[in-house]
Image: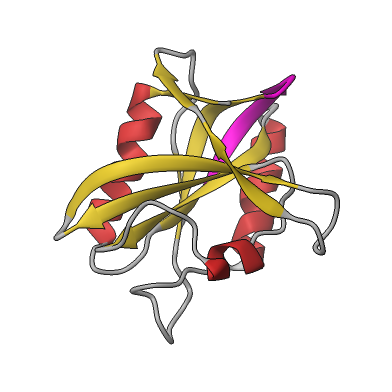
Amino acid sequence: MLKIDKSHYEALRCHGEETYPYECCGVLLGTMNGEQRIVTSTARCGNTRDDSPHNRYHIDPRELVRIQREGRERGEDIVGFYHSHPDHPARWSPTDLAEAHWFSCSYVITSVAKGKAEVTNSFELSGSDEADKKFVDEKIEIGELESKPQGRAS
């Protein structure tokens, strides 16, 4: 289960609206509590795809390392990622699965139709290696959590 504060949930949905018609992307930071991933902050990332940013995303590895380092300094770990699907359902695609490598993390997808965020779903990447990885539908619990400020990529 993914637990996320309402402000962070709304912020990632808003990010998708702001980048429409291109995919947005970002990182979810927080803690693991058993099977729960608890989001305490988010970090917006730049989509570095220049070939098809309307239906693909890529986070620069240097940006990801910086976000991970800054999160650890605050006592947070990467617990997931988010991106948008402009004019496409909030379901993972074969490309999303092929490019997902952070096992036991949440992958949140928001469908953005004509510039307006609609459905947001989450999927946990399960498996033990690349050969048997799969996405499993994951419940999102939105509430009032004690959260840290949202990170912004520079």
Q: Quadrant of residue 9?
A: top left
Q: Can residue 47 be seen in this view?
A: yes
- Location of residue 50 (image quadrant): bottom left
Quadrant placement of the N terminus: top right
In the image: residue 69, left or right of residue 130:
left
The image position of residue 128, as x and y in percent, is: 85, 50
Is residue 81 shown above or below 60? above
Main SS category, magenta section: strand
Color style of the picture = secondary structure
Q: At which x and y percent is residue 32? A: 70, 25
As for residue 154 lying within the magenta part, the answer is: no
Total number of numbered labels? 0
Looking at the image, residue 127 lies above or below residue 92: above
Q: Position of residue 55 (x, y in %)?
A: 38, 72
Q: Identify the image quadrant of the C terminus.
A: bottom left
Residue in view at x 34 percent, y 26 percent? 7
Report the span colored magenta.
Answer: 27-35
> Residue at the location (45% across, 57% down)?
25
Q: Which residue lies furthest to the right in this view?
A: 128
On the question of residue 99 being in view, the answer is no
| Vertical comparison of 2 with 13: above or below | above
Q: In front here: 46 or 101?
A: 101
Residue 8, placed above or below residue 85: above
Residue 109: x %, y % from top left: 42, 49
Q: Which residue is located at x 33 percent, y 56 percent?
A: 89
